[in-house]
Amino acid sequence: MANQSRYKETEQYLTIFLIASAVDFILFLIFAGTGIIWLKAITAIFAILLPVLCLAFLYLTKELLKQRSLWLTTGFFGIFLCTVVSLIANFPSPAV
């Protein structure tokens, strides 16, 4: 019973981090589109660092590929991948 309670608490914290990471990614897209380079860089760093740290946490707790945590793994990896692809493709480029 205590093990299930501990997982639920961990899941709640990781859900908050997932939402924060998604908001940060949206801010990254907004700042990239408006051409504010220094805010684009800061939000890009956080949009990469937070999902990677959460994926590392899931790996260390052996929850990375478990069925009950797969949605968290997919969410964090998706945000990481979208950020990296957006940086490589330079999308969105600032309006001229």
Image: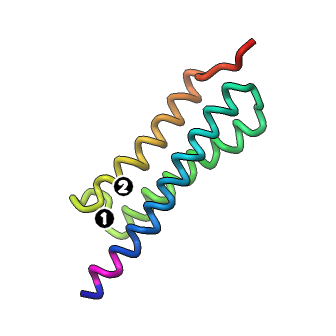
> Under tag 2, what secondary structure?
helix
Q: Is residue 5 magenta?
A: yes
Asked if marks 2 and 1 touch (Cβ < 8 Å), the reply is yes
> Under tag 1, what secondary structure?
loop
Type of amino acid under label 1? Glu
The 10 Å Cα crowd at callout 1, few under 14, some 14 to 19, many 20 or more, is: some
Q: Which residue is most to the top? A: 96
User: Which residue is drawn at the image coordinates 38% and 67% (left, top)?
Assistant: 11
The quadrant holding residue 66 is bottom left
Distance, label 2 to label 1, CA atoms, is 9 Å
Q: Main secondary structure of the magenta part?
A: helix
Q: Which residue is mark 1?
A: 63
User: Which residue is drawn at the image coordinates 27% and 79% (left, top)?
Assistant: 4
User: Which residue is drawn at the image coordinates 60% and 46% (left, top)?
Assistant: 24
Q: Is residue 60 above or below residue 51?
A: below
Q: Which residue is mark 2?
A: 72
Which range is magenta? 3-7
Q: Position of residue 75 (x, y in %)?
A: 39, 48
Q: Is residue 40 magenta?
A: no
Q: Position of residue 20 (x, y in %)?
A: 55, 54
